[in-house]
Amino acid sequence: MPRLTIFKKILITTLLLSLVPLVISSLFLFFSLESINSRLPVEIGETADRQASQSLQMRAQHVADTITDFLQRCENDALFLAASQLDQQSLMNFYITRRGELWELGEHADSSRETHTTVPLYSSIALLDAKGNEQVVIRDGRYLPAQELRNRGNPAGTEFKNEEYVRRIRELNRGEVYVSHLTGFHVSKKEQLGDADEPEHARRGALYRGVIRFGTPIHNRQGSLTGMIVLSLDHRHLMEFSQHIDPGRNFSTVFPSYKSGNYAFLFDDQGWIITHPKYWDIRGIDQNGTPFPPYRQESSSADVASGRIPFNLDYAAFVHPNYPQVAASVREKKAGYVDITNVGGSKKVMAFAPILYSTGDYGKYGVFGGVTIGFQVDQFHDAAREGSNLIRKQLGDHRRQSAVIVLLTALAAGCSAWWLSHGISTPLRKLTEGAHQLAQGETGSRVQITSRDELGDLAASFNFMAEELQQRKTNLLSTLDELRRSRLEIMDERNFKESILESISSAIVTFSPDGLLTSINTTGRAFLGSQTAVGMHYTELFREWEGMAALISLALHQQQGYGRQPFIREQDANATHFDVGFFPIASNGAKGLTVTLRNETEREKLREEMIRLDRLASLGKLSAGIAHEVRNPLTGISLLLDDLHDRNTSSPDDREMITKALAEIERVEKLINALLNYSSPTRIDFRPAELGMVVHDTVLLMRRQAQRQGVDIRTVGETPPPFRFDPEKIKQALLNIVKNALEAMTAGGTITIAMRSSAETALLVVCDNGPGISEADLPQIFEPFFTRKGAGTGLGLSITQRIMTEHGGGVQVTSSPESGTCFTLTIPLHHQEQGS
C-alpha cells in the first residue's frame, strides 16, 4: 500500500474540504432557486389580489362616506327652506346657488371632447299647501305658470304616476324629513344605445332622468300643517359618484367601459341598482307608473334583448351567488370584497361598502344602499406575471453564472490545494459564513480572526465593509421615515390651504412674476368664467375688465398700488362694484402677485337705497310739518281776503287784486295738499282689474285738453288679461306722465300709449315726440320737488315712481331731442301683497 505523504494528505484534505461543500452548496442553491421560482409568482399573485381588493374596498368606503355627506346636505337643504321666508325670489336664489358639476362626453359618436358643466342639484323645487296643491314650482330654471300647477296629493297625478310623497310628508312632525327611493321612467337598451354597440359609445341615446324626493312639512306657530317643501334631487348628480371611477390604470374616466368589467355602480337598500353604465339596469317604471320587474332567470328572451330588465341584486343569484350576499352584507352595514361574474361574463373582484343613512324610507336598515367597484381578476395578475418572468430570467442567468463559478472554483481549489495548508481552512470558513450572513441581510455579523497575515487583513476589511453597510442601511431607513413624514405633512398642509381657499366667498387669483395665472379658487372661476385655465396671461384673463390689467401691471412691474381699492366694471350698461386687493408674494413681489376680488354690488345698491329712503323720509316729515303749520294761517288769510272782496267799499282795482291774491292762495293750498298726499299716501288696494280700461279712462280724461293743444293721443297693443293691481293708483301714475307730456308739447304732436305683456309682467310704454328732457335733468326727474315748470309742484314723477315700486314694478325713461321721450311702466302680473 503506497504511503500517503503530508503533501498528499494536505492535497486530499484540501480538495475534500473545498470541493465537497462547494458541490453540496451548489446543489442546495439550485434546488432552492427552483423552489423559489415556482412559489414566488403564486405568492406575488396572491399578495397583489389581496392588496388590490383591500384598496378597492377602501375606495368604495370613501365613496360611500362622500355620498352619506351629500345626502345629509340635501336633507339639510329641505329643513333650511322649511325654516326660511318662502317667497319666489328666495326660492329662485336657492335653486340657482345649489349646483353641482357634470363631467360628460360630447354629443357626437366620433367626438372625444369632454365637458365640465355646473347644473342645479335639484331638477325641481316645489312649495305645496297642506292638501298637496302646488303653490310655487321652479323647474328647468323657471317658475311654472298657474295653469301648469297641479295637485300632487293623488299618486296618479304625480310626475311618475305612482308617488305618495304628499301623504308621507303629511305624517311627519316638524323638523322631520321624508326621503324617497329613486323614481324615474325606465330607459331600455335600444333607447340608450341607439346605433351604438356599447354604452360608452352611445352619445345621442336617451338619458335616465330620475329623482329622489326630499320633503318636509311646514307648520305655523300653533303647530298646524300649512304646507310642505319638496326638493327633487337630479339623478345625474348621483351618477357622478360612480360613473367616473376606473380602477384600472387610468384611475378615473368620463364614462367607464362595461365590457372591461372595470366600473362602479350603486344599489339601494332594496337591492335595486340606481347608477350603472347600462341605464337599462337601473330601476324604473313604465309610462303608466307601473314598476318593471327585476331581471330573473325566468325573464323572457324578448325582455332581455330589449333591456326591459332592471337589475336587483337580491334576484341575481342565477348570474352569480355572491350578488345577493353583497346586498345582505350591506344591509348589515358590512364592507368587503367578493369574486363575481357579471352579466357580460367578466370575472372580477368586486369591493363593496355600505352608504350609512337612515332618513325617510331608509330607516329600516339604516343604509341608503351600497357602493360597488369591480376590477378584472386577470389585470390583478399582470404585475405577478411580469415579476415571475423577470425572476425566471434572472434565476436562469444566475444558474448559468453559478455553474461557471462552481467550475472555476473547483479548478482553483484543485490548483490551490498544492500549496494551501490546513491553517488557512478555518479563516476561510469563517469568512464564508460571514459572507453568507451578509448576503442574507444580517449586517450585524462580524468575522473574528486574530491572525496578522493577509487573511487577517481580509477579515478586517470584511468587518469594516459590514460596518459601513449597517450604518448606511440605518441612515437610509431613517431618511425614508423622514421623507414619509414630510410627505404626509406637506399633503395635509396643501389640502388644508386648498379647503380654506375654496371656502372663501372672495375670488383669490395668483400670478407669477411674468404675469401668468398660477392658481384660482372656485369663486374666481365664477367671476372670470369657466374657461379660465392656469397659465393664462393677466391681460388675456382681464381683457373685458377695463383698467384692471393696468392696475396689475403697476403692482407686478413697479411694485406700486398694493392694498385694497374699489373697482367698477361696466358691462352691458350695468355696473358691478368690486373690492379689489393687490398683495405681493414674498418680498417686493419676487414670487408674484395675489389679487383678491369681492363683489360689493349688492352692498352698494343697499347703501344708495338707504340714502334715498332716509332723504325721502326726512323730506316727508319736513313736508308734513310745513304743510300743517302753513295751512291754518293760510285759511285765515283766505277768509279775510274773501270778506274784503265781498264788501262794496272796495274799489274795482282792489277787488281785482284781492281776486288774484285768492287765486295764488288757492295754488298754495293745492301745493300743500300735494305735500300732505306725498308724505302720507293711501294704501295700495289690490283687486282684479283690466289694464285696458285704465288706459281708456286716462285717454278719455285727457283727450279734450290734448285737442285744445293740437296733440293726438293714440293707444296701441293688446290688452293683457285681468290681474290684481290698484287701477286708481296706476291711473294716477299714467295721468302724471301724460300731463307732463302735454305741458311740454306746446306746439302739438303725438302721444302713443302702448300695452304689452309677457308671462310675468305687463308693460305700459308712453312715448311723445316733444322736445325731450335734457341729459343733465334725466338723473333728477324722479326727485321730489324737482321741476322746470314755474307753476308745478315737482311731485308728479316722484309719486309715479313710488306707485310703481309699491306694485313691485318700476319705471324707466329714455329721452332725446330728436325722438322725444318714452316712459316704460312695468307691473308684475303675480305681485305678492304684503301680509299675504
Image: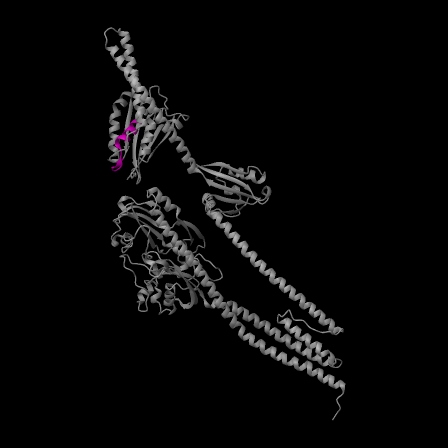
Quadrant in the rendering for residue 483: bottom right
Residue 644: percent from the left, percent from the top? 26, 10
Instruction: Choose between 539 and 321: the one closer to the eye.
Output: 321
Instruction: Choose between 764 and 311: the one closer to the eye.
Output: 311
- Name the residue rendered at 63%, 78% in the picture: 26
Let me know if residue 768 is in the magenta part. no
Quadrant in the rendering for residue 731: top left
Task: Tell me: residue 453, above or below residue 166.
Answer: below
- Name the residue rendered at 25%, 12% in the picture: 643
Task: Tell me: residue 204, above or below residue 592.
Answer: below
Task: Tell me: residue 428, above or below residue 763.
Answer: below
Let me know if residue 728 is in the magenta part. yes
Residue 30: percent from the left, percent from the top? 60, 78
Q: If the image is split into quadrants, where does the C terminus sit?
A: top left
Residue 590: percent from the left, percent from the top? 59, 44
Which residue ends up furthest to the bottom in the rendered image? 1
Q: Is there any visible trace of residue 91 in the rendered image? A: yes
Instruction: Choose between 582 and 714: the one closer to the eye.
Output: 582
Instruction: Choose between 83 and 588: the one closer to the eye.
Output: 83
Quadrant in the rendering for residue 662: top left
Structure colour scheme? one colour
* Magenta highlight range: 718-736
Q: How many marks do you count on the picture?
A: 0
